[in-house]
Image (cartoon, rainbow, N blue to C red):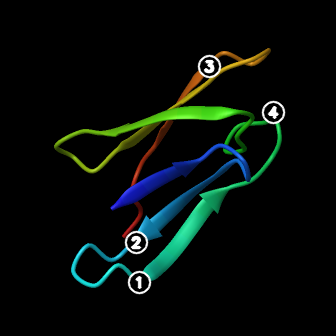
């Protein structure tokens, strides 16, 4: 399960079965892979994660899973 944390500009990854944290990515910034005022998150059937940001950046980023 993925949770967008707008306060810390991070996407938290939780184990859906027991709710324990499994990791995170992001961090405050305006470069690729960093997040600034994250506001939305979505996934697709291939496991890609899309994040939306508000304020000045107003962008969408795509994160692809790496095995």
Q: Disc 4 vs disc 2: which is toward the camera?
A: 2
**Local SS, label 2:** strand
Dot 4 or dot 2, earlier in sequence: 2
The residue at the point 40 percent across, 72 percent down is: 14
Work out how far the residue at label 2 is from the one at label 1, CA to CA, in angstroms.
6 Å
Residue 56's disc is none
Residue 30's disc is 4
Question: How many neighbours does mark 2 have within 10 angstroms: few (below 14), some (14-19), or many (20 or more)?
Answer: some
Residue 25, percent from left and from top: 61, 60
Work out how far the residue at label 3 is from the one at label 2, CA to CA, in angstroms.
24 Å
Work out how far the residue at label 1 is from the one at label 3, CA to CA, in angstroms.
30 Å
* Residue that badge 3 annotates: 59
Dot 3 or dot 2, earlier in sequence: 2
Numbered-mark total? 4
Discs 2, 1 touching: Cβ within 8 Å: yes
The residue at the point 70 percent across, 40 percent down is: 35
* Residue that badge 1 annotates: 20
* Residue that badge 2 annotates: 14
Dot 1 or dot 3, earlier in sequence: 1
Q: Disc 1 vs disc 3: which is toward the camera?
A: 1
**Local SS, label 4:** loop
Q: In which quadrant of the rendered view does residue 13 lie?
A: bottom left
Dot 2 or dot 1, earlier in sequence: 2
Q: Disc 3 vs disc 2: which is toward the camera?
A: 2
The residue at the point 57 percent across, 66 percent down is: 24
């Amino acid at each position: 399960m993925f949770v967008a944390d707008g306060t810390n500009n991070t996407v938290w990854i939780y184990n859906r079965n027991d709710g324990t944290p499994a990791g995170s990515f992001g961090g405050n910034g305006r470069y690729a892979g960093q997040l600034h005022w994250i506001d939305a998150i979505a996934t697709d059937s291939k496991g890609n994660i899309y994040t939306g940001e508000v304020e000045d950046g107003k962008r969408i980023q795509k994160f692809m899973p790496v095995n």
